[in-house]
Image (cartoon, helix red, strand yellow):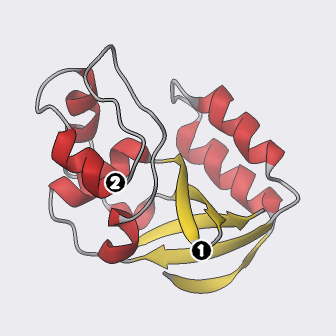
Amino acid sequence: MRVLRDASFEEVQQCFRRENQCSNSFDWTNQQLVKLSSGQWKYVLLARSDILMITTPSHSHGRELEVDSTIRTAVEKLPRAGECWDNVTSHRNRDFSETHVFLQCEAGQLAHLDGFHRLLAWVIFDKEKEVPAYVVWA
């Protein structure tokens, strides 16, 4: 992870709202970000090694994918059909340098807050550019 600069919570929230206002998980994620608003936020770039080790929440579209480990494990377990797969493949041609993910760092470990399907797509479709992210140390 390459830290580029400090970021204010206002910057984080504006970016999140701009990029995710139509997301089904908008309200839940926005609440998580607000809970972490007093933390120290940084704007970073993530390399492949960083992305593979991000811890993920339990995640399920029905019973398609249940994981509570890392992006690497989620990629290995992801069924290549169904709602989750459709969401992942919708990001196949996305310019990942123009979108952001939101993470929390606890005890040196990055944990997912927003951008799960985008991160899966980045790995599955062998993207190479670093991914911009906002990370909070809470």
Residue situated in front as seen by the camera: 99 or 33: 33
Asked if residue 20 is positioned above or below residue 28 in the image, the reply reads below
Whether residue 130 is visible to the viewer of this picture, yes or no, is: no
Give the structural element (helix, strand or loop) at label 1: loop
Q: Which residue is mark 2?
A: 71
Name the residue located 55 percent from the left edge and 67 percent from the top edge: 109
In the rendered image, the residue lying farthest to the top is 62
Q: Which amino acid lies under the numbered mark 2 shown in the image of this protein?
A: Ile
The answer to whether 76 appears left or right of 29 in the picture is: left
Name the residue located 31 percent from the left edge and 60 percent from the top edge: 95
State the image quarter where residue 97 is shown: bottom left
Q: Which residue is mark 1?
A: 108
Asked if residue 137 is positioned above or below residue 22 in the image, the reply reads below
Whether residue 80 is visible to the viewer of this picture, yes or no, is: yes
Tag 1 and tag 2, C-beta contact below 8 Å:
no
State the image quarter where residue 137 is shown: bottom right
| x then y, percent, for residue 40 | 80, 70
- Residue 56 bears which disc, if any? none
Q: Which amino acid lies under the numbered mark 1 shown in the image of this protein?
A: Gly
Query: Quarter of the image containing the C terminus?
Result: bottom right
